[in-house]
Image (cartoon, rainbow, N blue to C red):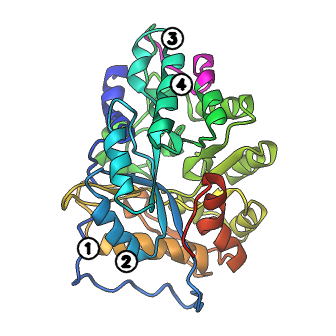
Amino acid sequence: MKRGRLVLGLASVALLAFGAAIAIGSLSSETDPSPEPLGPDARRTSERLQVVDVHVHLSASGVARLERLMEKWGFDHVVNLSGGHPLRGLPEQVVAARRSGGRVTVFASLAYEQAQEPGYGVRMARALEIAKEMGASGLKIAKVLGVALPAPDGGLIPVDDPELDVVFETAARLGMPVAIHSGDPKAFWDPVDKNNERFDELSAHPGWALHGEPVPSFDEILDQLERRIARHAKTTFVSVHFGNDAEEPERVARMLRKYPNLYIDTAARIPEMGRHDPEKMRAFFIEFQDRILYGSDLGVGPGNTPLFLGSEGTEPAGKEDEIRFFTASKRYFETADKQFDHPTPIQGNWKIDGIHLPRAVLEKVYSKNAIRVLDLQLPE
C-alpha cells in the first residue's frame, strides 16, 4: 500500500472528527438484562459518585439515545469529541448539545481540508476561533495527524509540524483544551498474523494496520507528540487513550511529571491498563490523581445503529456487550478483583486485575478533574 490505502483506511477517524454519523450496541430498552454485579470487592456507598465522560463520539441525531444511556449507566455529563468544524458538522452538533440541557460539551475538530494548500495553519486557527464563537469548548485532533494527513508537498504532516503552532497557541489564548490522539497500540505496527495479539481487531479493521506502511514508527509518533506538548506550555493537552501509550505507564508518568499542562484520559485502554501490575497502576493513579480524566470511547450513532464500545468487530455490539463494557470499566477502577474479562473483547484475549482506587481518587478521576479542566457547572 501505500499512503492512498492508509488514508482511506483511516477515513473513519476523520469522519468522526467532522461529526459524521458513526457506526457504533443496540438501543437499550426496558427489557434489557440488569447490569451484572461488580464483584465481591465492589464499593457500596450511599452517595453516588458523579461521572463525566470526556471521550464520547456522538451523532447529532443521537442525543436522546445518549441521554437514555447516561441515565442507565450513571453519567452526569459527556464531552462529544466528534463536533466537526464550522463548515462541516459543528453547527448541527452545537444545536444538538443544547437540546441536552447542558449535559453535553462539544469539542471542534481541525479543519483538515485546509491542509491541501500552503498556509493551512493560519486557516485552521481561524476556523478554531469561529468554532469557539459558535459554542465549541475544546479542540479534538484525530490520529490522522502524523500518519495519514497529507501535506501540500505530498508528504505527511507531523504532529509537531511548525505550521500548526498557531493552532495550539490559539487554543491556549481561547482557553480551549486540546484532546489529541497520536499513534495507536504498538501491535498496530506489527505484522497482521496469528502472532499479533490484536489480530481479530486488525482483521476487522485492515485500514488500521500500519505494518509496512510509509509512516513514522510508534516511538517517532510519541516523540513528535512530546515535542508538541513541550512547545506550548500555556496550552492544556489531554493526551487521550492513557497518554497514547497504555503499554508503557513509565513513559506516560515521565511526561506527566515533566509537563504540568498535560492530562490524560482512560478511553478504550482499560484492556492494556489492566494487564499491568495492579499495585503499580494503583500507585500511578494515586500519584497523578489530579491529571487523569475518565473517558470511555463510547460512540452513539443515529437510530438503532450498533454502539461503538471502545472498538468494534465484524459483528455488531449487542446488549450483553454494552453491559460488559460499562460494568467491567467500573470493576477495574473500583474493585480489587483478579483476572476478570476486560470491557472490550475485540481489543485482546486476556484478563485484567482491578486497582481498587480510594474514593477520593475516584471522585477526581470520575468528575472533579474534568469539571476543573473544562470549567463545567454540574448540578449538585
What is the CA distance from the residue labelled 2 to the residue labelled 1?
9 Å
What is the CA distance from the residue labelled 4 to the residue labelled 3?
11 Å
Chain-order first, disc 4 or disc 3? 3
Q: Which residue is mark 2?
A: 72
Which of the two discs, 1 and 3, sits closer to the camera?
Answer: 3
- Mark yes or no: residue 357 visible: yes
Q: Which residue is mark 4?
A: 125
Q: Which residue is mark 1?
A: 28
- Mark yes or no: residue 353 visible: no
Q: Quadrant of the C terminus?
A: bottom right
Tell me, for residue 131, which label it has, or none. Answer: none
Q: What secondary structure predominates along the stretch shown in magenta?
A: loop
- Give the side of residue 4 with respect to residue 316, left or right: right
Residue type for callout 2: Lys
Circle 2/circle 1 CB separation < 8 Å: yes
Q: Residue at x 75, y 48 (%)?
A: 256
160 drawn magenta? yes
Identify the element where label 1 is drawn.
Answer: loop
* 68 lies above or below 154: below
Image coordinates for residue 341, horizontal then vertical, percent: 45, 73
> Disc count in the image?
4
Bounds of the magenta span?
154-166
Residue type for callout 4: Ala
Image coordinates for residue 226, horizontal then vertical, percent: 69, 34
Residue type for callout 3: Gly
Chain-order first, disc 2 or disc 4? 2
Q: Which residue is mark 3?
A: 119
Which of the two discs, 4 and 3, sits closer to the camera?
Answer: 4
Chain-order first, disc 1 or disc 3? 1
Circle 3/circle 2 CB separation < 8 Å: no
What is the CA distance from the residue labelled 3 to the residue labelled 2?
47 Å
Q: Residue at x 53, y 64 (%)?
A: 52
